[in-house]
Amino acid sequence: MSAFHTPALPTAPLSFGDGQAAPRRVGRFAETRSVRWLRRMFAVLGPVTPELAARLAYLLLTRPPQVPERAWQARLRERARIDWLSVGGKSIRVYRWGSGPIVLLVHGWGARGTHLGRMVPALVQAGYGVVAFDALGHGASSGRSSTLPEFAQSVAAVAAHVGEVHTLIAHSFGVAMALWAQLDFGVRAQRQVLFSSLAYCKWVTEEFARLVGLPLAVLERGRQIMVERCNGLLDWDRLSVGQMLNQTTQPTLVLHDVEDPEIPFEHLLAVITACPTRSLELHVTQGLGHHRLLGDRSVIERVLEFIGPPAAAPGPAA
């Protein structure tokens, strides 16, 4: 059962751990047999051939996990109108349901366009047209790898394709990419709803390094390889969710579960702390975790309340 409240802001600097956290049992950073094998491999490669270890880390960090499509997602996909967009010689699959002002759904790392699909029927019934997509390297879109700029550019390409976006709804890693798409790639949205966000993008690489025992120097070299491969588009220090959110102006609803096992609740507090003058609406749940809150009826009702009926749509944000 979910409970809702506004969290108290922290009065001391937040800590994201010292690298000695207990092994996780769920999520992207769970302890698995493959992880233990990688840890043994990096223990050998790191001291002996750090450049090779860094390049392997780069390959792993830019290869989203493949998550099987669930039956309900397949049924939702079959009811969608499907378009294909060409971006830099690669193809992005786009899904549409309903008609009316556009709500654009942005999934997280390793997910697919239908991951936020539990919201689609309610949004369509409320009079909105809903658009989702598989980012490059995800789902049915081109490639098995994706850089951060490619993900953000996927958001921008879809937004440009559909025209004016009434509300942007993003989840997890997709929050950072949706905000970056607004700041650097021309995306505009009248409202935004941000679920289960991390505080800064470097954290993903730090968690990966902790998981597989990657030495700091090897991790830093792996991140630098990402910068080099992105031709200057990637600046790790700019990809702080709180700082990016603080630069947007539209009404914003931020949601997180206090028991999120994948992106701990401290990330929400860090995001809020980085926006001291930004007006945000907060919705905190308990017991819904990282994914189930996307389909919770009370959460969806809160999102609809925040968005409002299509006739009450505000003008474009300044």
Image (tube, helix red, strand yellow):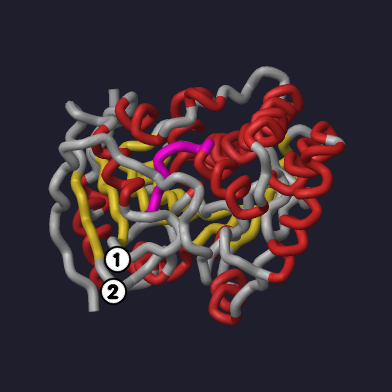
Q: Position of residue 310 (x, y in %)?
A: 27, 51
Q: Is residue 90 visible?
A: no
* Left or right: 169 as drawn, with respect to 310: right
Say what secondary structure mark 2 lies in: helix
Q: Identify the residue at horizontal 33%, vertical 24% (top origin).
A: 247
Kind of residue sitting beneath label 2: Arg
Amino acid identity at mark 1: Ile
Q: Which residue is mark 2?
A: 297
Residue 267: x %, y % from top left: 35, 46
Most foreground residue, 103 or 54: 54
Of 227 and 41, the residue lying toward us: 41
Number of other residues with Cα within 10 Å of mark 2, as a class: few under 14, some 14 to 19, many 20 or more: few
Horizontal side, residue 296 vs residue 99: left or right: left
Residue farthest to the top?
232
- Residue 318 in magenta? no
Q: Mark 2 and 1 residues: CB-CB less than 8 Å, in contact?
A: yes
> Residue 300's mark?
1
Give the x, y percent position of residue 112.
60, 60
Specify the segment rendered in magenta: 196-202
Residue 55 quadrant: top right
Quarter-wise, where is residue 48 in the image?
top right
User: Looking at the rendered structure, which numbered label has been put on residue 49?
Assistant: none
